Image (tube, rainbow, N blue to C red):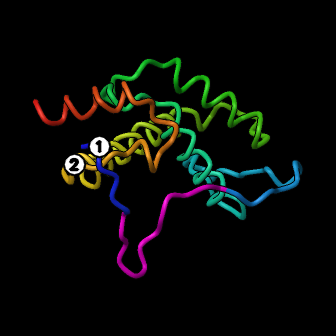
Amino acid sequence: MDEVRPITRKRGQRGIAAFKKNYRPEEYNVKFNENNIPNGGMSTQFMSCFGINVQQRFPIDEDPGKVKDKYFEDLWLEAKKQWNIESDDMKDYMKRRAVKLASNFKSRLVSKFVNNELDACAAYTFIPRDVWDRFVTQKNYP
């Protein structure tokens, strides 16, 4: 488990998203359609940033569907502030989306790291060692 092997990707597969491009503050603006789903010019960047924040804030050693509202509330308030979102109409949709993103992230960690006995802390530096060890133990001993 201590050995860190490089992750090889097949052609066309994406690596870890970093959201490195710097946008001007007035560009951080996202619109939502009548179903409260992000759409428009910056919707892709918004969802990418939102997904990265979900990965970093939601604990991987807890069930995403049962995660305390505090994690989402903090995430939502920060997203509203950064992306100039005025209404809370889309909050329920974004909460469901956050749970799905967290669940997908955990599944990816299991398939790429736990099943291959690799260390995710090298690739995802925001995951603390003790949390990763608990996560691996949970997945190996259901």
- The amino acid on which the numbered mark 1 sits, given as a three-letter code, is Asp
Tell me which segment is drawn in magenta: 7-19
Q: Dividing the picture into quarters, in which one does residue 128 lie?
A: top left
Q: Which mark is residue 42?
A: none
Work out whether 135 lies above or below 14: above
- The amino acid on which the numbered mark 2 sits, given as a three-letter code, is Glu
**Separation of marks 2 and 1 at Cα, in angstroms:** 9 Å
**Residue that appears at 57% across and 33% down:** 91
Left or right: residue 50 compared with residue 10: right
Please provide percent x and percent y for residue 133: 29, 30
Please provide percent x and percent y for residue 27: 84, 55
Which residue is denoted by mark 1 in the rendering?
2
**Residue that appears at 28% across and 26% down:** 134
Image quadrant in which the N terminus is located: top left
Between label 2 and label 1, give the one nearer the viewer: 1
Which residue is denoted by mark 2 in the rendering?
117
Q: Tell me the element at label 1.
A: loop
Q: Nearer the viewer, residue 110 or 97?
A: 110
Q: Kindly report the secondary structure that dominates the magenta region of the rendered protein.
A: loop
**Residue that appears at 80% across and 57% down:** 22
